[in-house]
Amino acid sequence: MGLVEKVLGFVFENPAFLVAVVLVVLFIAGLSVLTSGLKPGKNPFEVDSTRKPEALVTDQSARDKVLKQGFAAKKVPDNVDAIIVGSGIGGLSVASLLAKAGKKVVVLEQHDQAGGCCHTYIEKGFEFDVGIHYVGELRNNTMFKTYLEQITEGQLLWADLDDNFDNVVIGEPGKPKYFPLYCGKDKLRQCLVDQFPQEEKAIDEFFKLLKECRKSMMGHIMTKTLPPWLASILSSTGLINMMTTYYKMSQRSVQEVLEELTDNKDLQAVLAYSFGDYGTIPSEGSFAMHAALLNHYIYGSSYPVGGASEIAFHIIPTIEKAGGKVFVRAPVSQILVDKDGKAVGVRVHKSSGDIDLHAPIIISDAGFYNTVERLLPTKIAEKAGYKSITQDIRHGPGALSLFVGLKGTKEELGLRASNWWSFTNNQLSPTCKEYMAQTAEQAGENPIPLLFVSFPSTKDPTWEQRYPGKSTCAVITLGNWEWFQEWENERVMKRGEEYNKIKDAIAERMWEQTCLLFPQIKDKVEYFEIGSPLTNKYYIAAPKGEIYGLDHNKERFSPQVVSSLRPKTRIPNLFLTGQDVLSAGFAGAMFGGFLCASAVLNRNLMTDLLKLKKEIAKSK
């Protein structure tokens, strides 16, 4: 037996020795960070910054002064500490944290309104949110809630959805089976047992897995904070699985786990229903991601009082307090890199001539693909090894969003603050794959296998005051980028008759299926508009029309890829934020900003936030 075999044999026969070695390595890694000479930045959670909520601002011109500040070179502050590309919640959250740590930050947004997927638009007397449908972890005293209150200074208020917050509908249009879901772990478990009395054992095992995944989430975050060389060693040797169970869950698909728990296809579909919240079908989606999403909503969900634009409206002033600014109509065409390979600024494209801005810290909230394939010089991205990472990940699926304005109040129309997930059958993965593989023409003719149906106007207690006698409906489904790709370079609103014919046919099909669930709204339509994957690319700069960034498949959540998708990039002075850093959705992108701020400030913000949370709890 050779020396290598003897060493490996000893290691596997003595796991305690292996653990000791790992701990020593971690100690050395921690020591190297502490002695690196980098001083930690200021604590953005030093004091509780919340204050008594002020009255809702409904004057649109006053709101526009905050949300629609047009870019001009002369408006840019001097001596900027950081430039952030993109004003989604990933960009705004890190900007606010840095501002609270005394940094002067400039945020550059390519659209004409700040907020990314948190923005709203008003048309024909209706206001529509484009991305915020419900948010969890706000009914209890969670870290997430404390974090959000600090970056909005307690000015952003939330209204709870119904306890029956989600409803799963399975069956062909006109022949549905309904499965209502209730918030609260015990209530949710009981409603599942009531609907599937023969599956109590499988349901209990499912809840155990949710609990295990919740406990293991720090393993996901730890991988991003360890030195890259150490994360690589732990990942390649498998030692990381001795430190966390996260990757044992992340490398299994949702469908694989559910098929082990039960043979009941309806129950499998009900437990997998919310994959539409991150876009990856159950046969490919990571179970760890799915569990994180369900854990996020398990104790209830909420909606911003005053609408989704309230989010950016209350974060931007916290950035401005430190001398920073948030500009719109400021499309960044390039991240500037000096001869030593360091990020030193950005180039803003203007028809009157490009404008270069410089800062010691550059942060991209534009998404991983946009950053490494469009904004960075090709040679710099390749030298940093990012081309190899793109081979292990892929774009998330595109989406189509239907916005409908209705005549009548929620009481008159019989609507409530809940969501409906409608599936044509219980074979979620194969049915969705077949649908996405169709031609664009077929997609407008055949049943759509997944619809998310929501009535945002029912969720906002200020809606009736602001838009009396009106209601809104949002219907969302997955859509293939290739159906619309040929019109990619055409001007918005000028893409031609064939493009309109295809998207309108899909819209009519979506609405037809929606009205089978809610026949009372069929004849109440006053506004009707659909956004395609091209719409997503135009307004939120999504390269393939995706709304969730990178695909949330198992490969994306492998330890190797998780370590690579970290806030601190391989290019000095360049950082990433947003949902590609952590995961999709409002909370995922916001914690992506949290991790980014931790990296920029070189301090453990989780400890800072936890300390503040405890102090606030003691004072109440």
Image (spheres, rainbow, N blue to C red):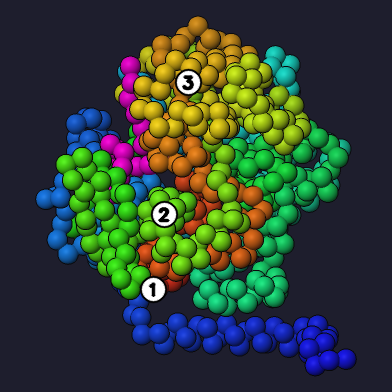
Identify the image quadrant of the C terminus. bottom left
- Mark closer to the chain start, 2 or 3: 2
Q: Residues within 10 Å of mark 2 (few under 14, many from 20)?
A: some
Question: Is residue 60 visible to us here?
Answer: yes
Q: Earlier in the sequence, mark 1 or mark 2?
A: 2
In the displayed orientation, state which residue is furthest to the left: 74
Decide: marks 2, 3 in contact (CB < 8 A)? Answer: no
**Residue placed under numbered mark 1 in the picture:** 602
Secondary structure under badge 2?
Answer: helix
Residue indicated by mark 2:
371
Q: Is residue 67 visible?
A: no
Do labels 3 and 1 touch, CB within 8 Å? no
Q: Which mark is residue 499?
A: 3
Q: Is residue 123 magenta?
A: yes
Amino acid at dot 2 = Thr
> Quarter of the image containing the N terminus?
bottom right
Q: Quadrant of residue 223?
A: bottom right
Direction top: furthest residue: 523
Q: Is residue 187 left or right of residue 105?
A: right
Does dot 3 land on a helix, a strand or a loop? helix
Q: Position of residue 575 (x, y in %)?
A: 39, 63
Instruction: State the image coordinates of residue 126 (x, y, percent, origin top left).
Output: 36, 21
Q: Left or right of 556: which side holds 270? A: right
Which residue shows up at 57% across the image and 78% down it?
230
Q: Earlier in the sequence, mark 3 or mark 1?
A: 3
Q: Residue furthest front?
A: 379
* Amino acid on which disc 1 is placed: Asn
Q: Nearer the viewer, residue 160 or 341?
A: 341
Q: What residue is shown at x 30% (from left), y 49% (from top)?
A: 332
Which span of residues is magenta-colored?
A: 108-124
Q: Looking at this view, is 40 or 547 the one in front? A: 547
